[in-house]
Amino acid sequence: VGGLLMVLVQLPSLVGQLRKGRTAGEASLGQEEPRPLDTALLATVLLFALCRQSQTLIERFLASQLPAGAISHLNYAQKVAQMPMILSVMVCTVTFPVVARALAEGDAERARSRVERDLALASCIVLLGTAAVVACAPQIVELLFQRGAFTARDTAATAGVMRVYALGLLGQTLVGVLVRSYFSGGRGSWYPVGAMAGGIVVTSWVGALSIGPWGVYGIAVANATGITVTALLLLAGMGPRSVPIRVRGVLGELSRPVRAALVATLAGALAAARFDDPVRGLGAGGLAVTVVFLLLGRALGAQGVVSAFRSVRSATRRLCHGRS
């Protein structure tokens, strides 16, 4: 039902675009042929998506060898931990048309600036969420799931897996942002498919080697390692194939929120551990993570945090000016 509603919500816009395309085609009849569908672009996008989704298939296949409950623990951990990544990728989804328009107009500098800002902001969002997930994993899982057949033992196992899985959230976000840069020019590119395939190979081998000694934690390690390798490969390939961002500058900028997230995670874990009640523990840990991350990120000059503070300050001034 949910999938059907997604289609119905988007259908009026699709019909409108098709009508505009038909009208434009009729108007340009005898002048210029309408631009045909780029099958290479379609094929590369679909294959990249297929490779990325196959990561879940590999994890479930490996986890099927483990005792009962392992797949459930992995599934719950992934669903919760992915929320920060989903929120962060929304940023670049909204700005994707800006990058595509800039490339279509030949303005590579504007496209580069937009992608670098998206990377900075999305990384700050996902690292803040990652810090909260790692610091407050037991409280989050207990609050959401611990009832009925889901016992305290399941909570501990799921929280442990979630913490390991969260280590790959930055890589997940970088892949989501960077892959749009490869396809925003409207041309098919096989490099992202190859990078994702390389990450899948790493996931498979690391998972196969680590599942014996570490169990479900080994699968989480494999997931984080594979997607991080894919992110690094996509970063290394930025240039003629996509938007020519400054890779060294991007890595230097990413190090700032990473440092802030490490300190915020420690502060949040200490605050959450002071309370036995999961609600109070989650509240204290989440507040500690947020305050420490934002203050330290601003002190370190993290672009995403500084931009957020600047936006809040501007909105506050406009509000005060409007009231006066």
Image: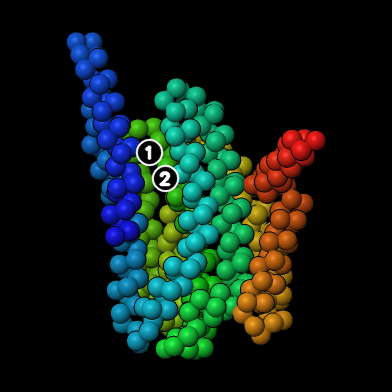
Residue 235 at x, y percent in the picture: 48, 46
Could you tell me which secondary element the residue under label 1 belongs to?
A: helix
- The answer to whether marks 1 and 2 mark residues whose Cβ atoms lie closer than 8 Å is yes
The answer to which of 187 and 281 lies nearer the viewer is 281
Per the model, the C-alpha gap separating discs 1 and 2 is 7 Å
* Up/down of 164 relative to 148, above or below: above
Farthest residue, direction left? 30
Farthest residue, direction top? 30
Q: Which residue is mark 1?
A: 183
Residue drawn at x 38%, y 63% is: 202
Q: In the figure, residue 277 lies in which quadrant?
A: bottom right
Farthest residue, direction right? 324
Residue drawn at x 54%, y 29% is: 110
Estimate how packed mark 1 is, as few (under 14), some (14 to 19) or many (20 or more) residues with alpha carbons within 10 Å.
many
* Amino acid under disc 2: Val
Residue 107 at x, y percent in the picture: 50, 24
Residue 192 at x, y percent in the picture: 37, 46
The answer to which of 104 and 219 lies nearer the viewer is 104
Q: In the figure, residue 21 lies in which quadrant?
A: top left
Could you tell me which secondary element the residue under label 2 belongs to?
A: helix
Q: Name the side, left or right, on which 221 lies relative to 127.
A: left
* Up/down of 109 relative to 83, above or below: above
The total of numbered circles placed on residues is 2
* Amino acid under disc 1: Phe
Q: Quadrant location of the N terminus?
A: bottom left
Numbered mark located on residue 179 in the image: 2
